[in-house]
Amino acid sequence: MTRPGDNPNAPLQIEREESGSKGRYVYRADGTEAEMTFSKAGEGMIIIDHTGVPDAFRGQGIGLRLVARAVEDARAAGKKIIPLCPFAAAQFRRRSEWADVLKG
């Protein structure tokens, strides 16, 4: 059985939702959702503050894909990311190719 996160290059329907200075990236399937929340810190920076992946999605790479989507969007918009969420911070430590969007 192919799971959503098995192929990191396969399309995954991740939506970006924003309201004021807060936002989130969300993946939904079978009535369940995984999310990564963020706060805007001025015009050029976002703070990733939480990644939540329910048990139904664990081990499928969904959390990584949520963070990767934020990296793609930040890069395209010329923004920097502060990963306060321990999961997101760990992903940044493992991926030197994300250094261009990491706020040092």
Image (cartoon, rainbow, N blue to C red):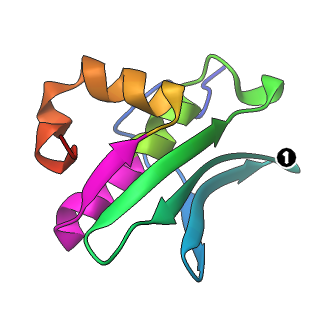
Image position, residue 36 (x, y; %): 59, 48
Image position, residue 41 (x, y; %): 39, 67
In the image: residue 96, left or right of residue 73? left
**Mark 1 Cα-neighbour bin, 10 Å: few <14, some 14–19, many ≥20:** few
Query: Residue 4's quadrant in the figure?
Result: top right
Query: Residue 72's quadrant in the figure?
Result: bottom left
Residue at (28, 61) in percent of width and height = 74
- Where disc 1 sits, the SS reads loop
- In the figure, 23 relative to 3: above or below? below
Q: Nearer the viewer, residue 32 or 9?
A: 32
Image position, residue 80 (x, y; %): 24, 56
Residue 5 seen in the figure: no
Residue 75 seen in the figure: yes
In the image: residue 23, left or right of residue 84? right
Q: Amino acid at mark 1?
A: Asp
**Residue position for label 1:** 30
Residue at (66, 19) in percent of width and height = 1
Q: Nearer the viewer, residue 12 or 70?
A: 70
Residue at (61, 42) in percent of width and height = 50
Does the magenta portion include 64?
no
Name of the residue lying farthest toward the right: 31
Q: Nearer the viewer, residue 23 or 11?
A: 23
Residue at (30, 29) in percent of width and height = 92
Magenta stretch prevailing secondary structure: helix
Q: How many marks?
A: 1
Image position, residue 49 (x, y; %): 55, 45
Q: Quadrant of the C terminus?
A: top left
Query: Residue 32's quadrant in the figure?
Result: top right
The magenta stretch is 69-83
